[in-house]
Amino acid sequence: MSEFLSADFLFRNAILGGLGVALLCSLLGVYLVLRRLVLIGVALPQASAAGVAAVFWLTGHGHGGAEGTHLLALAGSLGATFGALGLLVLGRHSAKSPAEWSVGALFAISSAATILFIALNPKGDIEMAGLLRGELLAITVSDLRALGAVLLGVGSLFFLFRRDLLLTSFDPEFARTIGRDPARYDFLLYVLIGAGIALGVMTAGPLVVFGYLVLPALAALRVAPGLVSAFAISAGVAAFSFLSGFWISYRADLPAGPVCVAVVAACWALASLAMRLRARRAAALLLLAALLPASPGCTSRTSRLAAAAEQRESPLPRGTLPEPLAGRPVAVLPFVNATDQPLRMSEGLLKDAERAVGVDSARPSPSVPELLRERAAIELRRRGFEVLPAEQTPTDGLLLTGTLRRFTNTGTGLLLVRLDLTLVDAQSQQVLWSGAAKRPVPIRSALTLQEILLDAGAPIFADAFGNR
């Protein structure tokens, strides 16, 4: 690596420029994935490439031409990207047809236009074809300077407006109630995405841009416990995969772009496999521990399952829970569902789980508040509290009550939740502590209620108990 980054290394600009593109795209990609704009991430790089190819054809020069031609090509990339982005955004608001139709048409037209412009340009076909393949070898010092300026600008804007961008992206209704205009911050986000894609295509090609817009974000969202860590993990995956891929391509004499994309795809596959294996084991333990208490003859088995589920979780600090209360037993009362939604598990899942442990009962399928109650007991034990069985109520201990006021899957990989918790003295009925979980929770592409609870259970109580 020291050889790669040395000043006299032939491909030093390619490494630094490609690494900058990978980092920039990995941060933008988290928004694209969470807002389900991945198809736009497919079409825009191709539209940008068509703009570059059109300028090369009109000027009669290639990617390695004069500096003036290079600046015109960058302008063509920006113009084509923002033009296509504007059409797609306007189409999403005005057209009655699905947005995917417009994206597919744009991709097909841009791909055809790019190939035709390359065929018509006898001077720039080799350079442009290399850019489309992701060769990464034509990056100049001016490219690096421009890329550095864009990275600095995008990073600064993301940092300054990070809260507003997240809020307006994933909870626009609440943003309006506190005086934030979602349209304004959507415009800012689209500007950042368009500028990053346009410069990235001009620097590293559409293949690298699209690969790093999607795959690092997908890998990060599979394992990240929160949004802040998702951005950090996405950038880390992008940096590792790009440097590793470039080293492999250099040793094996292969095109750098496709190899780097293959490496980051392998990182995503490994993250998905690890989370799938973990989810299956943990889901079986937690779901069965919640289902079995009402079934006769299963008390000992239930206690073993609950103990096994808790052993999978490491102890945690008590957060905002008062330290003197830890010596008193706690009974977790049934949580109240104030969402006006049934929030019940599927009947088929319940029956399959009961048959797996030899139980056949007629009890109704559990609801989200019931499973959150079970999770609350586990989280209290992790924080050093003695939790009484569900059927016992202490006369001189503590009572934990909960009210679920919001439980909404946004469809963008986030769960909007509001759970109010109160710890009450059983004798005096005095409120000794109160807390609430109200932050959006990443749910890692979960589709069913049980998958959502598996991903969101620990973060919900970490927020309520003050462990974040």
Image (tube, rainbow, N blue to C red):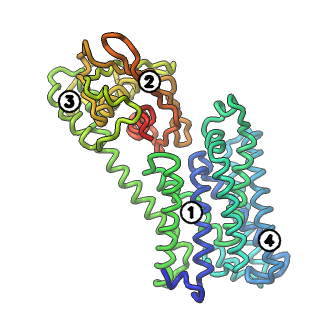
Instruction: Write down the residue under mark 4.
Output: 54
Report the mark closest to the observer, 2 or 3: 2
- Between residue 327 and residue 447, name the one nearer to us: 327
Q: Which residue lies most toward the front here?
A: 324
* Residue 130 visible: yes
| Quadrant of the snapshot with the C terminus | top left
Label 1: which secondary element: helix
Q: Which residue lies most toward the top here?
A: 428
Write down the quadrant of residue 430 in the picture.
Answer: top left
Q: Nearer the N terminus, badge 1 or badge 3?
A: 1
Label 4: which secondary element: helix
- Across and down, in percent, residue 194 comes to 72, 57
10 Å neighbourhood of mark 2: few (<14), some, or many (≥20)?
Answer: some
Q: CA distance from mark 4 to mark 2?
A: 63 Å
What amino acid is at disc 1? Tyr
Label 3: which secondary element: helix
Q: CA distance from mark 2 to mark 1?
A: 43 Å
Confirm or deny contact between disc 1 and disc 3 (CB under 8 A): no
Label 2: which secondary element: strand
What amino acid is at disc 4? Ala
What amino acid is at disc 2? Ser
Residue 202 located left or right of residue 207: right
Rendered image: mark on residue 434: 2
What amino acid is at disc 3? Thr
Instruction: Write down the residue under mark 1.
Output: 212
